[in-house]
Image (spheres, rainbow, N blue to C red):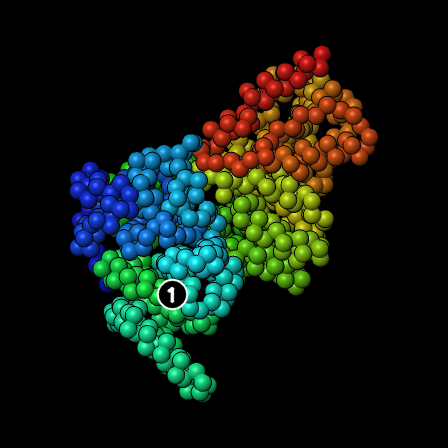
Amino acid sequence: MFKEHFNDPDASIDFGEPMEYRLLDRIDGVEALRELSEEELPELARELRHFLVRSVAETGGHLSSSLGAVELSIALHYVFNTPRDRIVWDVGHQAYAHKILTGRRDAMKGLRKLNGISGFPKPAESPFDAFGTGHSSTSISAALGMAVASHLEGESDRWSIAVIGDGAITGGMAIEALNDSGVWKKGLKLLIIVNDNDCSISPPAGALSQHLAKIVSTQAFNSAREMSKRMMKPIPRLWDVAKLFERQTIGLVSPQSALFGAFDINYYGPIDGHDLASLVKVLQNLRKMDRPLVLHVATIKGKGYKPAEADPTLYHGVSPFDPAVGIVPSGKKSKPTYTEVFGKWICDMAEVDKRLYAITPAMREGSGLVEYAQRFPDRYRDVAIAEQHAVTYAAGLACGGIKPVVAIYSTFLQRGLDQLIHDVALQNLPVMFAIDRGGIVGADGATHQGVFDIAELRSVPNMCVMTPSDELETRLMLSTAFQMDSPAAVRYPRGRGPGVEPGDDLATIPVGVSRMLREGSRVAFLGFGAMTNVLAPVAEALGGTLIDMRFVKPLDRDAVLEAAVKHELIVTAEEGVLMGGAGAAVMEALSDAGVVCDVMRFGIPDTFIEQGTQAELYEQIGLTPAAIEAKVRERLESNS
């Protein structure tokens, strides 16, 4: 393995004890970084890695990816003239070292917290964050656009740099951007860095590639390359042979080069992404060029912190922990999360229906499919970070008589909306969507809040949209959606439910029928999903009616109209955007029936919700029992 031959200067770091930050204490910005000698950079990396682990251990956050990008962050800011030269970090959860080096070290104590700094790059936060990210595979497109803008503005010395992981480059958008990048030749300063943290290369190839990268990235080599091109291009056969020879030579040490060669983009690497001397030298060489380039660096996720190296998935996104011992399972048995309810249901259903086929876009662990993937490998597919493909792949399976279940986060389903409409719903195919993290998710902030799905999906013909309020309802709705012969979505929140035992059977419920939880007077509370539980104490305090609506589409119109006739006020609550959401559906139903009734809607306002804990954000936007009760009392008093 290539990674076994990396130098390991971090082996002696004691993450359980404080460290004297002899160099890091001097870095209050990139100018101070560039004053260091190249020989001091490895020591800076050690100190930065120590600080990162201890900082994230206090706040929580994305650890493995950021540890793997420490040296790369240092080298980029050391060599390039940032922020004038722009770095776009794909996804951005590997950018913590970048944040620290660009003057936000003290702000790390507020990482992913309410009113603190974002866990992702955010231009409003710093001029060094060239582009806002949070979803994958966008960096090359954005950096290409920036590079073309610089070219048009005559800024011939300004670089645009995309840092993209080997996982994110599987996304279709990245491939589209590579295809476009290859059209541009001289005069465009675009550098695409492929941060490959799952690389397996034999030791001789690793050493050879380091040497080759230094040679082919020099000005002399590239001048010779350009001269050869001018001399041989008029003789097509000779030019074709020369191109083939170069690609095959580089391909000996890196088969990945074939991908970029197909797009006619000059490729360099792979090189050790933790060898600062080599990184700096190669980047200095590449900076002298003026055309789109690809640099392939091999790194280790979790680099330097042994627990994270051993299990980078566990340490990908962490809650606070003791850095001296690492993450220790609590051992306490608690009520299951909604994700765990889904994970058990899909295994149970797969046992009785051999047509079930599960699909996820690179979220096996997050979506609760680990056990399913182990038990039913022939009926499981992780399509990598390719949400659009996941949806249309499911449509194709449905055409063949299979019953696909697409397990996907709400925020990531946004990327497959076109395919859901045109490839699934338009053809009325029985594809089921298990939508996790519906609603407020907390610390990941605006890019990950799952608040748009209800409004998006209820506008699509043939779609059925269900919002369970507890664990049992989730299991019932999953079975109901799976048994339907048309598109269906079950949308459930992040975290744990109220503790209702989900059971083991595979019973279903009538489609489009709500359930009455409490009968009262004056005000009818219509809850969608987990907000039903928030409304329960309010309905009790005010003596009102409480209905768990269950379905956003088809909406139980009879229940809505009856509530309007019997009550002076209807209150709806949903953990989704109000514009076009479930509350809007209730008002549409009343309007269509010509019924006039006072309606109050509670949900997500017309703004992006930033990071914070779920509880803090509910408080901030007024989705707590106390806030709802106060506003409803005020309305009832004003109506009296």
- x, y (%) of residue 223? 32, 74
For badge 1, the amino acid type reads Asp
Query: Alpha-carbon neighbours of circle 1 within 10 Å: few (<14), some, or many (≥20)?
Result: some
Pick whichever, 67 or 326, lies toward us.
67
- x, y (%) of residue 317? 39, 44
Helix, strand or loop status at disc 1: loop
In the picture, residue 158 is in which quadrant?
bottom left
Quadrant containing the N terminus is bottom left
Q: Is residue 499 visible?
A: yes
Q: Is residue 446 left or right of residue 290?
A: right
Pick whichever, 598 or 607, lies toward us.
607
Report the residue that reaches farthest toward the right: 594
- x, y (%) of residue 349? 58, 50
Residue at the spot 52% in from the left edge and 63% down from the top edge: 176
Q: Is residue 551 left or right of residue 308?
A: right
Vertical relation: 87 (above or below) 471: below
Pick whichever, 507 or 308, lies toward us.
308
Quadrant containing the C terminus is top right
- x, y (%) of residue 423? 66, 58
Residue at the spot 37% in from the left edge and 69% down from the top edge: 267
Q: Is residue 339 left or right of residue 331?
A: right
Residue at the spot 30% in from the left edge and 61% down from the top edge: 283
Vertical relation: 16 (above or below) 518: below
Residue under numbered circle 1: 290
Q: Is residue 354 visible?
A: no
